[in-house]
Image: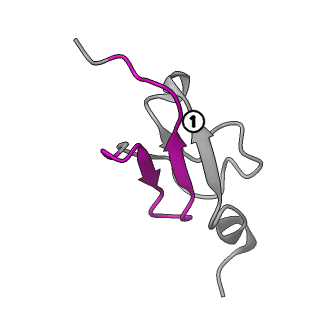
Amino acid sequence: MEPAAASSNRHKQVAVTAADLPLHCPLPSQALWDAHPRVFLPIGGDGEALCPYCGTRYVLRGAVKPAH
């Protein structure tokens, strides 16, 4: 049985914008911001990232300026 903190973020989808980059999970705004260690997540070519700890799927909304 997994702890309630780990399961409460599982299977959530969260929209993020360029202002949230670099992306990490959990975000400070999430109710259980201390549910697991902070992990930085790369956004894939499909504009999504999946947290390996809790399963939260992050979906990038809007454009991101290319790096210099």
For residue 3, above or below residue 13: below
Quadrant containing the N terminus in the rendered view: bottom right
Q: Point out the residue furthest to the left here.
A: 68
**Nearer to the camera, 22 or 58:** 58
Residue 60 placement (x, y as % from top left): 49, 38
Image: 53 above or below 15:
below
Task: Residue at 37% x, 42% y: name it.
Answer: 43
In front: 16, or 33?
A: 16
Mark 1: which amino acid?
Answer: Val
Specify the quadrant that holds the C terminus: top left
Q: Magenta stretch: residue 67 in it?
A: no
Q: Position of residue 30 (x, y in %)?
A: 71, 45
Measuring from the top left, give residue 66's x and y in whole percent. 29, 18
Density class for disc 1 (Cα within 10 Å; few <14, some 14-19, many ≥20) is: some
Residue at 43% across / 30% down in the picture?
22
The front one of 44 and 2 is 44
Across and down, in percent, residue 49 comes to 43, 50
Disc 1 marks which residue?
Answer: 16
- SS under mark 1: strand
Instruction: Specify the farthest residue to the bottom.
Output: 1
Please identify the dominant SS of the magenta region: loop
Residue 50 counted in the magenta span: yes
In the rendered image, the vertical position of residue 42 relative to residue 50, given as above or below: above
The residue drawn where x is 57% and y is 58% is 56
Which of the 4 image quadrants contains residue 12? bottom right
Magenta highlight range:
44-65
Left or right of 65? Residue 20 is right
